[in-house]
Image (cartoon, grey):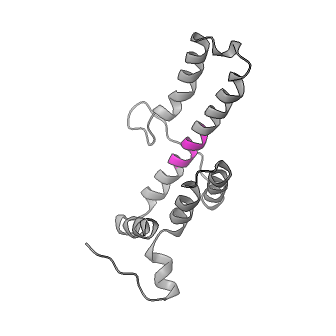
Amino acid sequence: MTISLPGFDIKRWKTYADWRLLIFLLLFINVRIPFKIVALIFVYISQFNFQFGFKLRNSRIPLFYLLVFPIAIAAAVINQNFSNLYYIPVFGWALICWALALLAVHQVKLMVDKTDAETIYRTLIIFLS
Protein backbone atom coordinates (compact mmCIF):
# COMPACT_ATOMS: atom_id res chain seq x y z
CA MET A 1 0.00 0.00 0.00
CA THR A 2 1.41 3.37 -0.94
CA ILE A 3 0.49 6.70 0.51
CA SER A 4 1.04 10.13 -0.92
CA LEU A 5 1.31 13.34 0.99
CA PRO A 6 -1.24 16.02 0.14
CA GLY A 7 -0.19 19.33 -1.37
CA PHE A 8 0.39 22.22 0.99
CA ASP A 9 -3.11 23.08 2.16
CA ILE A 10 -3.10 24.05 5.84
CA LYS A 11 -6.61 22.72 6.49
CA ARG A 12 -5.78 19.33 5.00
CA TRP A 13 -2.41 19.17 6.80
CA LYS A 14 -4.05 19.75 10.18
CA THR A 15 -6.23 16.66 9.77
CA TYR A 16 -3.74 14.60 7.78
CA ALA A 17 -1.87 13.27 10.81
CA ASP A 18 -1.96 13.49 14.58
CA TRP A 19 0.76 16.10 14.96
CA ARG A 20 0.76 15.93 18.74
CA LEU A 21 1.50 12.19 18.57
CA LEU A 22 4.19 12.80 15.97
CA ILE A 23 5.93 15.47 18.06
CA PHE A 24 5.67 13.27 21.14
CA LEU A 25 7.21 10.30 19.31
CA LEU A 26 10.03 12.39 17.86
CA LEU A 27 10.95 13.79 21.26
CA PHE A 28 10.43 10.60 23.25
CA ILE A 29 12.43 8.38 20.90
CA ASN A 30 15.57 10.39 21.72
CA VAL A 31 17.97 8.56 24.02
CA ARG A 32 18.48 11.49 26.39
CA ILE A 33 16.17 11.67 29.39
CA PRO A 34 15.63 15.47 29.22
CA PHE A 35 14.04 15.04 25.77
CA LYS A 36 11.72 12.39 27.19
CA ILE A 37 10.73 14.70 30.03
CA VAL A 38 10.08 17.57 27.58
CA ALA A 39 7.95 15.21 25.48
CA LEU A 40 5.90 14.22 28.52
CA ILE A 41 5.48 17.83 29.64
CA PHE A 42 4.38 18.79 26.12
CA VAL A 43 1.82 16.02 25.88
CA TYR A 44 0.45 16.54 29.40
CA ILE A 45 0.06 20.28 28.74
CA SER A 46 -1.77 19.59 25.49
CA GLN A 47 -3.87 16.76 26.96
CA PHE A 48 -4.00 16.81 30.75
CA ASN A 49 -5.20 13.45 32.03
CA PHE A 50 -4.01 11.40 34.99
CA GLN A 51 -6.87 8.90 35.01
CA PHE A 52 -4.91 5.75 34.29
CA GLY A 53 -7.85 3.35 34.53
CA PHE A 54 -6.12 0.54 36.39
CA LYS A 55 -8.56 -2.30 37.04
CA LEU A 56 -8.10 -5.94 37.83
CA ARG A 57 -10.00 -6.86 34.66
CA ASN A 58 -10.06 -4.93 31.41
CA SER A 59 -7.45 -2.44 32.51
CA ARG A 60 -6.63 0.36 30.05
CA ILE A 61 -2.93 -0.01 30.71
CA PRO A 62 -1.14 -3.29 31.49
CA LEU A 63 -1.02 -3.85 35.25
CA PHE A 64 2.70 -4.54 34.96
CA TYR A 65 3.36 -0.79 35.03
CA LEU A 66 1.59 -0.55 38.38
CA LEU A 67 3.13 -3.70 39.83
CA VAL A 68 6.74 -2.94 38.85
CA PHE A 69 7.18 -0.58 41.81
CA PRO A 70 6.21 -2.96 44.65
CA ILE A 71 8.00 -5.85 42.91
CA ALA A 72 11.22 -3.81 42.66
CA ILE A 73 11.01 -2.72 46.29
CA ALA A 74 10.33 -6.27 47.47
CA ALA A 75 13.23 -7.62 45.40
CA ALA A 76 15.60 -4.98 46.78
CA VAL A 77 14.56 -5.75 50.36
CA ILE A 78 14.84 -9.53 49.88
CA ASN A 79 18.26 -9.22 48.22
CA GLN A 80 19.38 -6.71 50.87
CA ASN A 81 20.46 -4.26 48.19
CA PHE A 82 19.72 -1.24 50.34
CA SER A 83 22.72 -2.04 52.54
CA ASN A 84 24.93 -0.67 49.76
CA LEU A 85 24.61 3.14 49.71
CA TYR A 86 25.48 3.29 46.01
CA TYR A 87 22.43 1.20 45.19
CA ILE A 88 19.87 3.69 46.52
CA PRO A 89 20.31 6.42 43.84
CA VAL A 90 20.43 3.81 41.08
CA PHE A 91 17.27 2.21 42.43
CA GLY A 92 15.55 5.59 42.63
CA TRP A 93 16.58 6.42 39.07
CA ALA A 94 15.20 3.10 37.85
CA LEU A 95 11.85 3.85 39.51
CA ILE A 96 11.81 7.30 37.88
CA CYS A 97 12.41 5.69 34.48
CA TRP A 98 9.54 3.26 35.06
CA ALA A 99 7.30 6.18 36.08
CA LEU A 100 8.21 7.97 32.83
CA ALA A 101 7.32 4.82 30.90
CA LEU A 102 3.96 4.62 32.69
CA LEU A 103 3.18 8.26 31.87
CA ALA A 104 4.21 7.74 28.24
CA VAL A 105 2.18 4.60 27.65
CA HIS A 106 -0.85 6.29 29.23
CA GLN A 107 -0.65 9.27 26.88
CA VAL A 108 -0.01 7.15 23.78
CA LYS A 109 -3.03 5.01 24.67
CA LEU A 110 -5.17 8.16 25.05
CA MET A 111 -4.02 9.55 21.71
CA VAL A 112 -4.59 6.26 19.89
CA ASP A 113 -8.04 5.82 21.43
CA LYS A 114 -9.15 9.30 20.33
CA THR A 115 -7.80 9.10 16.78
CA ASP A 116 -9.03 7.01 13.87
CA ALA A 117 -6.85 4.26 12.44
CA GLU A 118 -6.17 6.01 9.14
CA THR A 119 -4.79 9.12 10.84
CA ILE A 120 -2.61 6.99 13.11
CA TYR A 121 -1.35 5.14 10.03
CA ARG A 122 -0.47 8.39 8.25
CA THR A 123 1.23 9.68 11.41
CA LEU A 124 3.38 6.55 11.62
CA ILE A 125 4.23 6.78 7.92
CA ILE A 126 5.52 10.33 8.47
CA PHE A 127 7.36 9.25 11.63
CA LEU A 128 9.07 6.32 9.91
CA SER A 129 9.93 8.27 6.75
Q: Is residue 63 above or below residue 26?
A: above
User: x%, y% of residue 94?
Assistant: 61, 33
User: x%, y% of residue 34?
Assistant: 68, 51
Q: Is residue 76 above or below residue 68?
A: above
Q: Quadrant of the C terminus?
A: bottom left
Which residue is farthest left?
1
Question: Residue at 49% across / 53% down in the picture?
Answer: 108
In depth, the one of 19 and 49 nearer the eye is 19
User: x%, y% of residue 91?
Assistant: 65, 27
In depth, the one of 55 and 81 nearer the eye is 81
Question: Residue at 44% across / 37% down in the picture?
Answer: 62
Q: On the rendered structure, is 104 left or right of 34? A: left
Main SS of residues in magenta: helix
Which residue is farthest right?
85
Is 121 one of the magenta-colored residues?
Answer: no
State the image quarter where residue 112 is shown.
bottom left
User: x%, y% of residue 1?
Assistant: 25, 72
Question: Residue at 58% across / 51% down in the picture?
Answer: 31
Q: On the rendered structure, is 29 left or right of 62? A: right
Question: Residue at 35% across / 64% down in the picture?
Answer: 117
State the image quarter where residue 30 is shown.
bottom right
Residue bounds of the magenta highlight? 99-106
**Exactly how many numbered labels are in the figure?**
0
Q: Is residue 90 above or below residue 103?
A: above
